[in-house]
């Protein structure tokens, strides 16, 4: 089965002083034009590209000095940004454009000719070399609208979406249940072994970033505010790299035809923001969605598939007897001990095992609303063993003992 997969190739352009100056000037003009159109959209409420083109196109050409295609790209960029804010449920506010970047339409504003990237500017069209060995002439790839980004150091990058067709096996032959959390970012179970990704080093670095931010916030100086932005960008890059490495390890360590089963954590941020203030930063710092998106496209490129399930009871249901009892899980000691059959294991591993079982039922074609496709629509799959509810045990029940001693990454445990 063929599937279209889109990834973003980020290449750094080799620029001299004059080339860099033209690119920065074009990006600055594009940014000011976007901010101007954003003010008009916020004041009038008009978010239609057609009507905005009739009222603002002459101004974008004469006042801001943009070329015809750049003016059209400005209108589409601003409208898309407001549509994104609205779809995410945020309050409608005036959107400010501060980053030095602009969009380039394939074939009009950018192209690749004889190993050089041709980029349009306000002054002239530049033909530039780039770092890396990506072949923009390879067959089977479709390139979309690129984005030129100028970082604070003045380096110019071109972010280019690449769509290619990949072969996905018609039948998945292997299932991996993946439980995500804070203490252990990923716990993967494939029916034979359990792989743990420990999160202590991630939490420690998050804590260092938090302490540094608090110190800078107390200074209240322009240099401290500038430093805060730098620290924020650095933390985002680091967290993105962590997610890349984890998702790449999962995709590389499993063969083609593997089905990854994840919990659908939509709305998790709203839930984590209700925790105590002192614990809130740790709860919201982990980017579950970013890891999910990276795993989805890496799995597609490797001939694998990702499905999402309803997370209800995945940490309370015994994977052996099917009994659901919230008292079986001892969160303080991170241990699960079934109140019915006595099965005992790490509580995060229990979640991964239940996700694995849901994946097995998905392969059997059992219809169940808990299984969702990557697009979020309900699909086939579920637990054939119907969950059994247990009457809540009285308060004051004796806690389960200490954690299992076996906790190393990639360790095998018997089912």
Image (cartoon, rainbow, N blue to C red):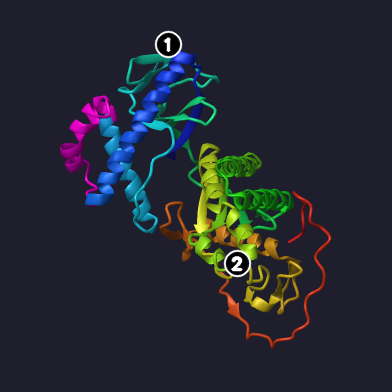
Q: Is residue 395 visible?
A: yes
**Magenta-span inclusion, residue 58:** yes
For the residue pair 396 and 295, the one nearer the viewer reads as 396
For the residue pair 137 and 395, the one nearer the viewer reads as 395
Q: Residue at x 18, y 31 (%)?
A: 58
Question: Among all residues in the image, which is located at the extreme bottom?
Answer: 394
Q: Secondary structure at mark 2?
A: loop
| Quadrant the C terminus occupies | bottom right
Q: Classify residue 66 by image quadrant.
A: top left
Q: Classify residue 1 by image quadrant.
A: top left
Q: Residues in magenta?
A: 45-70
Image marks 2 and 1: residues in contact by CB distance under 8 Å = no
Residue 174 against residue 110 in the figure, above or below: below
Q: Residue at x 18, y 41 (%)?
A: 50
In percent of width and height, residue 18 lies at 44, 14
Q: Is residue 137 visible?
A: no
Q: Which mark is residue 314?
A: 2
In percent of width and height, residue 125 lies at 35, 15
Residue 54 against residue 258 in the figure, above or below: above
Q: Which mark is residue 114?
A: 1
**Magenta-span inclusion, residue 278:** no
Q: Residues within 10 Å of mark 1 (few under 14, many from 20)?
A: few
Image position of 126 (left or right of 395): left
In percent of width and height, residue 188 lies at 66, 53
Q: Residues within 10 Å of mark 2 (few under 14, many from 20)?
A: many
For the residue pair 281 and 175, the one nearer the viewer reads as 281
Image position of 312 (left or right of 372): right
Q: Earlier in the sequence, mark 2 or mark 1?
A: 1
Q: Secondary structure at mark 1?
A: loop
In percent of width and height, residue 213 lies at 63, 50
Task: Give the CA distance from mark 2 to mark 1.
Answer: 54 Å
Q: Classify residue 142 by image quadrant.
A: top left
């Amino acid at each position: 089965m063929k599937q279209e997969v889109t990834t973003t190739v980020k290449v750094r352009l080799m620029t001299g002083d004059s080339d860099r100056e033209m690119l920065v000037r074009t990006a600055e003009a594009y940014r000011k034009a976007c901010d101007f159109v954003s003010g008009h959209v916020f004041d009038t409420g008009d978010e239609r590209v057609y009507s905005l083109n009739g009222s603002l196109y002459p101004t974008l050409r004469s006042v801001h000095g943009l070329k015809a295609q750049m003016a059209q790209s400005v209108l589409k960029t601003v409208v898309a940004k407001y549509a994104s804010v609205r779809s995410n449920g945020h309050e409608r506010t005036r959107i400010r454009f501060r980053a030095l970047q602009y969009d380039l339409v394939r074939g009009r504003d950018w192209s690749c000719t004889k190993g050089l990237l041709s980029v349009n500017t306000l002054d002239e069209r530049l033909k530039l070399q780039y770092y890396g060995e990506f072949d923009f002439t390879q067959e089977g790839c479709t390139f979309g609208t690129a984005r030129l980004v100028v970082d604070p150091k003045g380096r110019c990058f071109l972010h280019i979406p690449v769509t290619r067709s990949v072969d996905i096996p018609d039948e998945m032959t292997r299932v991996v249940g993946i439980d995500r959390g804070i203490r252990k970012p990923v716990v993967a179970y494939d029916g034979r072994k359990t792989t743990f990704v420990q999160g202590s080093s991630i939490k420690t670095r998050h804590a260092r970033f938090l302490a540094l931010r608090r110190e800078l916030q107390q200074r209240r100086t322009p240099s401290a505010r500038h430093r805060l932005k730098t620290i924020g960008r650095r933390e985002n890059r680091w967290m993105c790299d962590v997610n890349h490495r984890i998702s790449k390890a999962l995709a590389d360590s499993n063969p083609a035809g593997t089905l990854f089963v994840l919990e659908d954590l939509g709305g998790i941020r709203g839930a984590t923001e209700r925790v105590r203030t002192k614990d809130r930063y740790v709860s919201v710092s982990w980017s579950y969605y970013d890891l999910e998106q990276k795993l989805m496209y890496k799995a597609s490129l490797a001939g694998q598939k990702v499905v999402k399930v309803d997370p209800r009871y995945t940490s309370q249901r015994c994977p052996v007897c099917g009994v659901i009892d919230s008292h079986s899980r001892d969160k303080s000691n991170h241990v699960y001990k079934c109140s019915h059959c006595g099965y005992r294991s790490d509580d995060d591993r229990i979640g991964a095992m239940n996700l694995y079982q849901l994946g097995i039922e998905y392969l059997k074609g059992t219809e169940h609303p808990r299984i969702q496709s990557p697009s979020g629509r309900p699909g086939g799959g579920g637990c054939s063993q119907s969950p059994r509810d247990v009457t809540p045990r009285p308060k004051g029940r004796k806690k389960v003992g200490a954690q299992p001693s076996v906790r190393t990454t990639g360790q095998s445990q018997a089912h």
